Amino acid sequence: MEGNKIIGSYALLRSELNSRQDLSPWLACLFVEPEYRRKNIGVQLQNHSINQVRLKGYEKLYLCTDLTDYYERNNWNHIGKGYSIDDNETRIYEYQIRN
């Protein structure tokens, strides 16, 4: 938040891809308003989500995206591909939670 304006957000979901119901939880909907990008807010939101997942006792966090390089720079590991509900291929990433 900046004042009363939401400048970034994310969601934590139990399930993100029908093709990978074996993986949980998922970081989803990470968004930063365009004028606030390149200010480390996306990384701060990722770190917040990781801390929330750690508090819940999970050892891993997952996400799917078509982006390349962004998440790798933030210690996410590409573990394969999955398919969205409309059968589009997407990249799956895993983050190992360290206690």
Image (cartoon, rainbow, N blue to C red):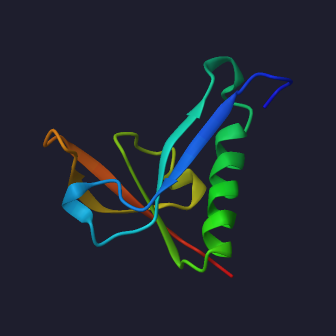
Residue at 64%, 41% in the rendered image: 42
In the rendered image, the residue lying farthest to the top is: 35
| Residue 84 appears left or right of 32 | left
Please state the horizontal and vertical placement of residue 73, each as a whole percent of the image: 56, 52
Residue at 68%, 74% in the rendered image: 55
Residue 77: name its quadrant: bottom left
From the viewer's perspective, is residue 94 above or below residue 17? below
| Residue 76 appears left or right of 1 | left
Q: Which quadrant is the N terminus positioned in?
A: top right
User: Is residue 94 or residue 10 the one in the foreground?
Assistant: 10
Residue at 62%, 75% in the rendered image: 56
Residue at 51%, 44% in the rendered image: 70
From the viewer's perspective, is residue 46 above or below residue 86? below
User: Is residue 81 or residue 18 the one in the foreground?
Assistant: 18
From the viewer's perspective, is residue 55 above or below residue 42? below
Please state the horizontal and vertical placement of residue 50, each as a whole percent of the image: 63, 63
User: Is residue 68 or residue 81 the one in the foreground?
Assistant: 81
Q: Which quadrant is the C terminus positioned in?
A: bottom right
